[in-house]
Image (cartoon, rainbow, N blue to C red):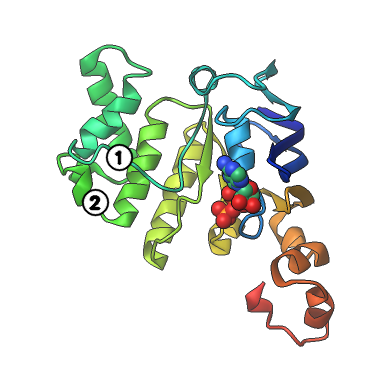
Amino acid sequence: MLKVEGLTKIFGGLRAVDNASLEVPEGRIVALIGPNGAGKTTLFASIAGFHKPNSGKVTLLGQDITGMAVHDIARRGMVRTFQITQPFAKLSVHENIAVGAYQRFPRRDEAWEHARRIGEQVGMGAMLEQPAADLTVAGRKRLELARTLATGPKLLLLDEVMAGLNPSEIVEIIEIIQKIRASGVTVLLIEHVMQAVMSLSEHIYVLSYGKIIAEGAPREVVSNPAVIEAYLGRGAAEKMAAGHVEASHA
Ligand SMILES: Nc1ncnc2c1ncn2[C@@H]1O[C@H](COP(=O)(O)OP(=O)(O)OP(=O)(O)O)[C@@H](O)[C@H]1O
């Protein structure tokens, strides 16, 4: 569904993303992990049209979309969420979701009904009439998910939708993401919550200093010495193998 080949994005002298390649097959949940500042959000933004890559190629459903505008990419079925959510605070939850739904259903009644269904899908059925300003962090994260989902994506790019959530909220949103995938939407997610990455994704890419340093099945990737070192520093993998570092810190 999505193929990224040799993507590089440079800010000033900084190679925030350096020759990164990845693939997301249709119907899968794929995760992109890596330490803070590794370049994950920059890679997302470069894939979804928010940044123009310096080099590399992005292919969506067989079409070259490199450097295309955000709305053209969205029309082709790929949308992203944002880490910092910015709903229209004075509008209700239902109205906020409808803003996304209008991109797919120009008729008001259809967009409205679609927005209600999406609201229920993300567990916000009882909150539809609330102003977005009254939502908790978890509510705002769900609303962000609902707004992008309402545009009818084939591929959803989720940027840290679990940040700031408590354990039970995380379990709920994991279930919602599983349902979204079951409804036919492919997912690429950036996430720091390892519990979620491990239980949701079938394939993981690890970014460190802009480069993809490892990829594979979740269990393989978390025990990869290069990945452990990227998170814990040089020599950590060896110390861990010798029992000097708690595995839970990885
Ligand atoms: N618009 C920008 N201009 C200049 N430098 C930027 C810009 N956006 C990001 N960077 C830099 O690029 C690098 C990668 O940042 P990015 O936000 O992509 O990392 P990240 O892996 O998403 O981090 P986090 O997990 O903390 O969200 C960082 O060094 C950051 O300071």
Q: Is residue 187 visible?
A: yes
Q: Is residue 191 visible?
A: no
Q: Could you tell me which residue is drawn at 51 percent across and 31 percent down?
A: 184
Q: Which residue is mark 2?
A: 135
Q: Secondary structure at mark 1?
A: loop
User: Dot 1: few (<14), some (14–19), or many (≥20) neighbours within 10 Å?
Assistant: some
Instruction: Tell me if 70 is positioned left or right of 18 in this view.
Output: left
Quarter of the picture holding the C terminus? bottom right
Residue 236 at x, y percent in the picture: 78, 76
Q: Is residue 191 above or below residue 98?
A: below
Q: Secondary structure at mark 2?
A: loop
Q: Which residue is mark 1?
A: 87
Pick the residue in front: 231 or 195.
231
Q: Could you tell me which residue is drawn at 70 percent across and 66 percent down?
A: 231
Decide: marks 2, 1 in contact (CB < 8 A)? yes
Q: Is residue 43 above or below residue 60?
A: below
Residue 245 at x, y percent in the picture: 72, 83
